[in-house]
Each structure stands twice: as structure tokens, then as C-alpha cells.
Image: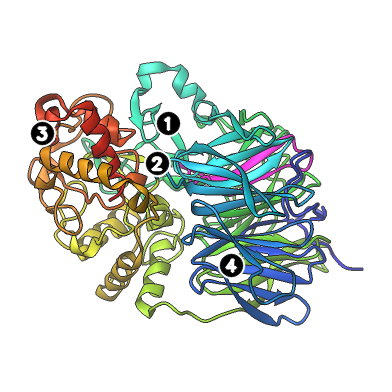
Amino acid sequence: MKQRLLGAALAVSLLLGPSCASPAAGGGNTSSGSIAATHDDALLYAADSDLNQVFMVDTKTNEVRGISVGKQPEKVLVAPDDTIYVTNRMDRSVSVLKRGETSETARIAVAVEPVGLAISTDSKTLYVVNAASLNDPTVGTLMAIDTATRQPKWEVPVGSEPRGITLVNGTAVVTLYKSGDVVTVDLDKGSVVRAGSDVFAQLNRTLLSNGPTTGIGFPNGNGNLGGPATSHPRGFEAITTSADGSQVFVASLLSSDAVLQTSTTTTGPGTTVPGSSQGGYGSSTSCGATSVAAAALLTFDSNGNALVDDSTSCGSTSTDRPPTVLTTGIPGTALQGPRAMVADPTGTFVYVAHFNTNNVAIVPTTTRTNPGANVPTPDGSRGPASVTQVVPVGNGPTGIVVAHDGLKAWVFNAFDHSISQLEAVKDQQTGISTVVNKATIHVADDVLPADVVAGRKLFFSATDSRMNDPAMGIACGTCHLEGREDGHVWNFVDGPRQTPSLAGRMLSKTAPYHWNGEFNDLMSFMSLTVQHRMGGTGVTQQMEQQIAAFLDAQPTPDNAAKERTPADVLARGKAAFDKANCAQCHTGEALTNQTFADVGTLVTAGPVIDDVTLLPKGALNTPSLLGVGRTAPYLHDGSAVSLKARIVDGKSGDKHGATSQLSDAEVDDLVSYLKTL
């Protein structure tokens, strides 16, 4: 008798329901991210963003056939009628494929950087999440498309940088990637019914209730008031629903607002804060996690209310929802970069693919204390854990699909161009079934330059000891999500520092580096970051060159404002830019003069202040403005939530350009111009 795919020590089937969440009743998705399967599990479809192809794989013969689609295909969905839909992120389109065919059937025009996909149970309406709209790079949209006519039914703004979607009880729940929140949309009316949730407040309810004594009041990123003790959710992408539709699960990072101290940082006479053995940050997140941005599974009810642990107290034995912070209990094995997730509609597990640690965590949905924590690991050690099992897969997993009969699962590994096949294996002596990576299907070879390929792996790895302490689970991509930025303001001993975007900003040509500008070359910058902050043994000159090659290869995020802003508005905005002397600092091809400026934003009061003694020039490094429209919040402390807010608030004293000369109309034109850069 065939053994169903099981979590370690728990004899529960992975038998799942339909491949897409029903707008009426919920039901966890059987696929998530870059891979999906037909309803008889005969064919897999995996999107390879490097090759601009979707690979169709016969699950019996492992025969692989490529299908050309749009630029940078990212998400795949198989509809109830076995039509395949693919979001082409850098092509503003969705490809339509018919089962078994080796060419596109159609391509549907959508908005900027389409990512998440969902479909109605009758296959008549396709829902597409666009990271930005065609009219405004600061706002993304949800679009409903008639699958018969392939024309939009409606499109609604949902907030900044949306990514994932699940359907439940007549609504769509959409994730906001950087701000770490969810938006609820009525599918009949095509309107937002709830623009956010209480997730930040619930994660920090004890700290927030204590008021100023914990330093509450320091603004962070999306405007939520936090302090040095709070946690901020980030990286909201993968989302699914429980079997009965009563709960929504979001894979997330919890980023620390603590003042980050390394093992060599003195905090008082003769006192240091422990870090890793190689350096880097110690534990700054609650619930036993050792990363400053811990992997988490956040639960919401069907109305969008957060059901999460208080960050000051974890480990409850209640059985109403999954654990909040994900811990493995295995020394040296971390979870980082949740990217894709499928749920078991029997209500037992969710399976989360972690992009930075190359593994899949099997997480129980009905307990926050892992019932399998004492299951022996191969090396005989296992400590307290909130996940049932961790399964190693290939490099850079971006999607996971579970067979409809529950016998197998497949994971697409983007950096290896491979598919890991997972199956349950029963130990004949103990009778315990564990999930193993049974086989690997290679679908393609690398097409990018070798140094770019190597640099990308280094940048996103949380397991390479040269780059980090694997026990800590920190990658460059932990803060620079997608190679861009996380919208978070990190509190360092030298002051608050908002994560700058790295994509399309000619990084290797824009020294010095850091907001402090203390590094004149990438090598010294990376050495400090890797060893002092991430706990790695250190980069070599070759590694530095590889990472630089990857960063320089990253394009500026797509921006429709560049071609859609009226010429007269663009001309007036450029005139306002010149009138305010913006080009004095923001000049050249990278829109930075690579020097220092005091624009009146140094933080001199509050729970976290700027240590001006650590600023080489007594001022801050001038950032590039390339792609600035999609990089909110702004300023080194993230205190400006929008470009207009910064210009208006900065008028006093003309510390940040001669903006006091601008009229209200000129300010609006300047903002429109900045959004096109």
C-alpha cells in the first residue's frame, strides 16, 4: 500500500483539495509560486525567470519541454479547467497556456510587475496582483480578468507593493510585501473593504500598551509606531487559506526594531552583547529565533484580524493556530526567506519553501508547540522547535506544489534550474515516516554570465559560512528583499538606517557606501557587513567581484510613469527640480554626486539617535534617485512616508534643496517628475 506524504512522526495525509482557493469556501492551494501541476498530476509547469520559459515536465517520464513566455515569468497557476496562467513580471503580461501544448495560446496585458495569481472555482475570472499600477509607481492593484474575453472586469488600488493573493468567502486577501500587511477586497464589488490589519499591534500588544517607557513613538517604515523593542512584519508574499476557510496564513519575516549590537559592541563598562562565534548579531528576535529577521507564519481570521503571538511571550500550547515564529530546533539549521507555501486542507500542515536557506519547513497548523520536537535527527540532536520537519531542497526554491493524491510534492529551485521531488519514507524499525528529497529533475542550464550566477547565490545565501553564520540565518537578501529593499528602518548603534534599494542604481560606480559613507570601495563595505554584521568568515576579492556583477546586472524596477507621464508635466517637474537646486546633489547618470549632505534630518532626540561622531563628514551620504518612486519610505530614518511629504516637510530653512521657492503646483509637478526617474 502506498505511503502518503507525511510530516515527521505524524501519520496525517497531505491529501489536498482544488488547486486554487475558492472564493466561496476557502481551501488551501495545492501550488504556490513558480510551479503548479495539472489536476491529474501528469504534468508540472515551472516558470524559469532566467530563461523566459515555462518548463512542462511529464511526471512519469521526467521528459522536459520548454515553452517561451514573456520576460521574467514568476508565478504559475493551473485553473480548475487545466488552463495554465503565468505572470510575466517584467513584461506587464500574463501568458495563457493550454495543457500539453508547447506554445502560448494568448498573452493578456496587465499592469506593472504582475506577480500573484488566483482564479474563481468556475475558471471564469482570473485575479492578477500588480506590484505597481500603470498610473502611479507607488500604488499596486488587483485586477479581475474575464477569462473568456481576456479583458479586465475591474481594477482596484490595494496599496504599496502588493505580491500574493488568496480567495476566501467572496473576498480576496492581498499581501503588501514591504509594509507587512494584508488588504481585503470584495470580489463582487471590486472594492477594498479593509485597507490593512492589526497585525503590528497584535504582535507588539504588550510593548505598545506600556507606552513611552519602552521607547514607543519612533516611526518605522510604513508609519507604524515602533521602538527599540518591537517587531515589524516584512516580506509578505506567500499566502494561503486553511481547509475550512476560517483562517488565512501568510509566510513572513519578523524584522527586529532592537538596537542591533554585534559581539564586539560595548554596551557598558566591561559589558558586551553576545553575537556569533565569528562576529555578527546575536539573537534579537523573541521565541527562540536567532535572526534579526526571523521566519514566521502569521495567521489571520477570515475578516483580516491578526491571530498571532505577542512578541514578548511565545510557546503557548493552545491548538487554535500555527506557531508564529518558525524554529527548527536543529543546530546550524535556520529558516530564512519564505517564498512559497501550500496548505493541507485537512487542517494539519502548511509547507513553506525558504528561498535563502534552501529548505522546506513542515509546520503544524493546530499547535504552537511542536509535537515532533523530540524526533531524532540524523546527528542525534534536536532542541525546541515549532516546525515538525525541515527538508533540504535545491538552491533558491521559489515554488512548491503537492500532488492531488497526497503522495508527492515538487519544489522548483530557481538557481539550480531544477525540481526536487519530495516523498515520504517510512523507517522500518521505528515506524516513523519522514519526508525526504527523493529525486532531482534538471530542467535547464545557466544562461546568465558565470559571475552573475555566482554572485546571486552568494547574495541570497543564508547557509554559506563565508557570507554568514548559518545558525543565524542572515543573508544580504534578508534586508535587500528581491535585491531591492525591505522598507524597514534598522536601529544601529550609530542611528536609525533605512534600507536603500540596490536594484538598477549603478552600485559599483557610486562609492562611497553606507549612509555614513565610511567605505570607499565595495570590498571594505562587504567585509564589514559580512563579518561584523552577518557573522561570515569573509569575502574574497573574487566573491566581491561576483556580488558586484550580480548587483550591476539587476535592472531598475519597472515603472510605467517613465512613458506615461505627460510631456508638459515632465517638463514642469524638471524645471521645478532645477529651480530647487536638486541637481546640486542628485546629478550625473546615477543621480548622486557621491558626496555628503546634511539635509536637516539627523536624529538628535528620541529612543534611537544618530551618533554624529561616526559620520566621517558630519553628514550623510547622498543616495541615488534612480527608481526612487518605488522605494518608500524616504530619508535615512524612514521618516518621510512619501516623496511629497518630504518636500513639504523639508521646505522650512531650505535644508533639503531650495524647496521653499516652490508653489503647491510646482511641488506636485516635482513629485511627478521624481516618480519617472
Please check the rendered image and state whether residue 246 is part of the magenta-colored stretch, yes or no: yes
Check whether the beta carbons of the residues at disc 1 and disc 4 lie within 8 A of each other: no
Q: Earlier in the sequence, mark 4 or mark 2?
A: 4
Q: CA distance from mark 1 to mark 4?
A: 37 Å
Q: In the image, which is nearer the foreground, mark 3 or mark 4?
A: 3
Secondary structure under badge 4?
Answer: strand
Mark 3 is surrounded, within 10 Å at the Cα level, by few (under 14), some (14 to 19) or many (20 or more) other residues, namely many
Mark 2, residue position: 138
Check whether the beta carbons of the residues at disc 3 and disc 4 lie within 8 A of each other: no
Tell me which amino acid carries mark 4: Ala
Residue 296 appears in the picture as rendered = no
Mark 1 is surrounded, within 10 Å at the Cα level, by few (under 14), some (14 to 19) or many (20 or more) other residues, namely many
Q: In the image, which is nearer the foreground, mark 4 or mark 2?
A: 2
Mark 3, residue position: 658
Mark 1, residue position: 230
Q: CA distance from mark 2 to mark 1?
A: 26 Å
